[in-house]
């Protein structure tokens, strides 16, 4: 398997990377433009903010949960990329996530233009044709060599029958519950990201309505999302290059934590003022933190989970994420309907992000401290065992020395008799 990775990494793997960039731009980049259609959907269906928020939340939730549609492209691209790259995996993930940035940049501008020309119904019909390009990207993702460890039963064992057993094996193969139970790093990271997404998706949906409610022109409001996406195009590869250095090996989770913390703090800027210049500054600061999250979220997952279990770990990871992604926009919409103040929406987002950053950072700090202490105890135990073995060895050597016969050196005396004649 390593030979395949090294060979592909210098040739076809870069084609796969390009396909993954396009896929992420189509899938993960698209939901950020939903805010452009928020007012039109709310007007046509005469719905409240909470009711209208169910539209983007269901779409993003299914994207993470793997039920239908874009989820097949998104999860397949992430998984295949991890098998095609080994030495440059961190950089590859960062470059692939730049596809999201390109999508965030282009989707709002395209959406604004098509919405004015064809309305939201005609625009969504055109979007369906654009998404068909994902089929071309999937065609270039050739299969890689099979993993050394396989979840399928060995040939000499007869397969056991039973619907429940078959379903159980399928769940074990595609959802890493065993890894979740036994791998502390994966468990804490997954729970932290699930909590983080309660606040992370909210600004993407409510930023444009927030700007419009403060008399920002429609084209300028759409430009705010494009500013975030355009900044991410350059920031994500840079963060990937920095995070890929050997000094950050095993510490990338702390970079991710800092990005989440900055993301939460940046949302408080919107509470200060809603002028266009302040919102542009907010978008720039938000872009830095968002780039760190986007470039590292899957790389940290690869760091804490073995690659032979990554696909199943990613499946469980995204399914759990889908629950919070599903409820967070309607919850924010309900808060907006109740209070009538967008500030509470950004307060809510900051709360979830900041608390998630502290949870992930402290959890990994304690886990690594525990592992270090355990390692020191094992080393101390080995030293004590060696210390007990050394006197026994010395005693054995002394015993052998005393049991061996000892020959003392002695001098030989020779008597010479002289006989004289008379």
Image: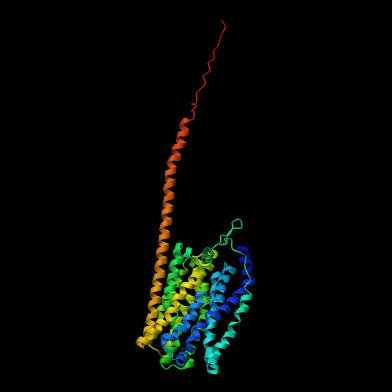
Residue drawn at (47%, 69%), measured in percent from left and top?
252
Q: Position of residue 300 (x, y in %)?
A: 49, 69
Q: Residue furthest top?
A: 422
Using the rendered image of the protein, determine whether residue 277 is visible from the camera's viewpoint.
Answer: no
* Colouring scheme applied when the structure was drawn: rainbow
Q: Residue furthest front?
A: 162
The quadrant the N terminus occupies is bottom right
Q: Position of residue 39 (x, y in %)?
A: 45, 91
Q: Quadrant of residue 265?
A: bottom left
The quadrant the C terminus occupies is top right
Q: Position of residue 240 (x, y in %)?
A: 52, 73
Q: Position of residue 33 (x, y in %)?
A: 50, 85
**Residue closest to the eye, 71 or 166:** 166
Establish if 385 lies above or below 350.
Answer: above
Q: Quadrant of residue 394?
A: top left
**Residue closest to the eye, 405 or 421:** 405
Residue drawn at (53%, 90%), measured in percent from left and top?
121
Question: How many numbered circles does the render carry?
Answer: 0
Q: Residue furthest left?
A: 339
Residue drawn at (57%, 88%), measured in percent from left and top?
125
**In this image, 255 relative to 158: left or right?**
left
**Residue closest to the eye, 26 or 87:** 26
Using the rendered image of the protein, determine whether residue 135 is visible from the camera's viewpoint.
Answer: yes
Q: Quadrant of residue 127?
A: bottom right
């Amino acid at each position: 398997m390593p030979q395949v990775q090294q060979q592909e990494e210098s040739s076809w793997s870069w084609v796969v990377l390009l396909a993954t960039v396009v896929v992420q731009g189509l899938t993960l980049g698209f939901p950020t433009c939903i805010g452009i259609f928020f007012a039109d959907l709310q007007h046509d269906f005469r719905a409240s903010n909470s009711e209208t928020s169910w539209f983007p939340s269901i779409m993003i939730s299914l994207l993470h949960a793997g039920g239908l549609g874009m989820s097949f492209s998104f999860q397949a691209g992430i998984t295949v990329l991890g098998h095609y790259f080994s030495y440059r995996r961190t950089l590859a993930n960062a470059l692939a996530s730049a596809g999201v940035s390109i999508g965030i940049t282009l989707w709002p501008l395209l959406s604004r233009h098509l919405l004015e020309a064809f309305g939201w119904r005609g625009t969504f019909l055109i979007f369906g044709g654009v998404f068909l390009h994902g089929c071309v990207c999937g065609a270039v993702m050739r299969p890689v060599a099979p993993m050394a460890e396989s979840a399928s039963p060995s040939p000499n064992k007869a397969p056991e029958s039973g619907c429940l057993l078959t379903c159980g094996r399928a769940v074990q193969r595609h959802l890493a519950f065993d890894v979740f139970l036994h791998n502390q790093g994966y468990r804490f990271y997954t729970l932290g990201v699930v909590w983080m997404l309660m606040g992370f998706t909210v600004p993407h949906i409510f930023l444009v309505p927030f700007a419009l409610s403060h008399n920002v022109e429609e084209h300028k409001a759409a430009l705010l999302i494009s500013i975030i996406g355009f900044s991410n195009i350059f920031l994500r590869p840079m963060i990937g290059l920095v995070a890929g250095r050997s000094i950050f090996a095993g510490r990338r989770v702390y970079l991710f934590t800092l990005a989440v913390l900055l993301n939460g703090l940046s949302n408080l800027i919107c509470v200060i003022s809603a002028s266009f210049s302040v919102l542009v500054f907010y978008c720039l600061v938000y872009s830095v933190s968002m780039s760190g999250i986007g470039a590292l979220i899957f790389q940290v997952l690869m760091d804490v989970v073995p690659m032979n279990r990554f696909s199943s770990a990613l499946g469980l990871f995204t399914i759990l994420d889908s629950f919070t992604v599903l409820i967070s926009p309607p919850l924010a919409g309900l808060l907006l309907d109740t209070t009538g103040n967008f500030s509470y929406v950004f307060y809510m987002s900051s709360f979830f992000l900041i608390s998630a950053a502290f949870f992930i950072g402290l959890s990994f700090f304690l886990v690594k401290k525990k592992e270090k202490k355990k390692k020191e105890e094992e080393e101390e135990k080995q030293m004590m065992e060696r210390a007990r073995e050394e006197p026994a060895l010395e005693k054995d050597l002394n015993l052998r020395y005393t049991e061996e016969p000892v020959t003392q050196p002695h001098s030989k005396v020779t008597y010479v008799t002289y006989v004289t004649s008379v």
